[in-house]
Amino acid sequence: MLFNHKEKQMNPSTKDEIKGTVHEVKGKVKETAGKVTNNPNLQAEGNAEKNTGKVEKKIGQIETVFEK
């Protein structure tokens, strides 16, 4: 069944928050995998990606405040 209504576009701030959460989770997984496998490079890469995700998420939250 087709719908004729327009779908609401996602706000850029919401997209940033989602991307940030995804990077944060991926980073945690990599960091944990690095610890388990005793791979400091993977652990550091995961930590960096996790921190990047936190920053991205915070940017999205700040943008949300300014959109109102």
Image (cartoon, rainbow, N blue to C red):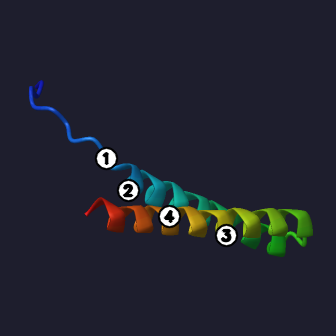
Sequence-wise first label, 4 or 3: 3
Residue shown at the point (12%, 24%) measured from the top left: 2
> Could you give the CA–CA distance between mark 2 and mark 1, rounded to whole angstroms?
7 Å
Q: In front: 29, or 44?
A: 44
> Could you give the CA–CA distance between mark 4 and mark 2, rounded to whole angstroms?
10 Å
Sequence-wise first label, 2 or 3: 2
Label 2 Cα crowd, 10 Å radius (few <14 / some 14-19 / many 20+):
some
**Displayed quadrant of residue 4:** top left
Q: Are marks 2 and 3 in contact (CB under 8 Å)?
A: no
Residue shown at the point (31%, 46%) measured from the top left: 10
Rendered view: 17 above or below 9: below
Q: Are marks 2 and 1 in contact (CB under 8 Å)?
A: yes
Disc 3: which residue:
51
Callout 4 amino acid: Ile
Disc 1: which residue:
10
Disc 4: which residue:
59
Q: Position of residue 38 (x, y in %)?
A: 90, 72
Callout 3 amino acid: Asn
Q: Position of residue 49 (x, y in %)?
A: 70, 62
Sequence-wise first label, 1 or 3: 1
Disc 2: which residue:
14
* SS at circle 4: helix
**Displayed quadrant of residue 18:** bottom left
* SS at circle 2: helix
* SS at circle 3: helix
Callout 2 amino acid: Thr
Callout 1 amino acid: Met
* SS at circle 1: loop
> Could you give the CA–CA distance between mark 4 and mark 3, rounded to whole angstroms?
12 Å
> Could you give the CA–CA distance between mark 4 and mark 1, rounded to whole angstroms?
16 Å
Q: Which is in the foreground here, disc 4 or disc 1? A: 4
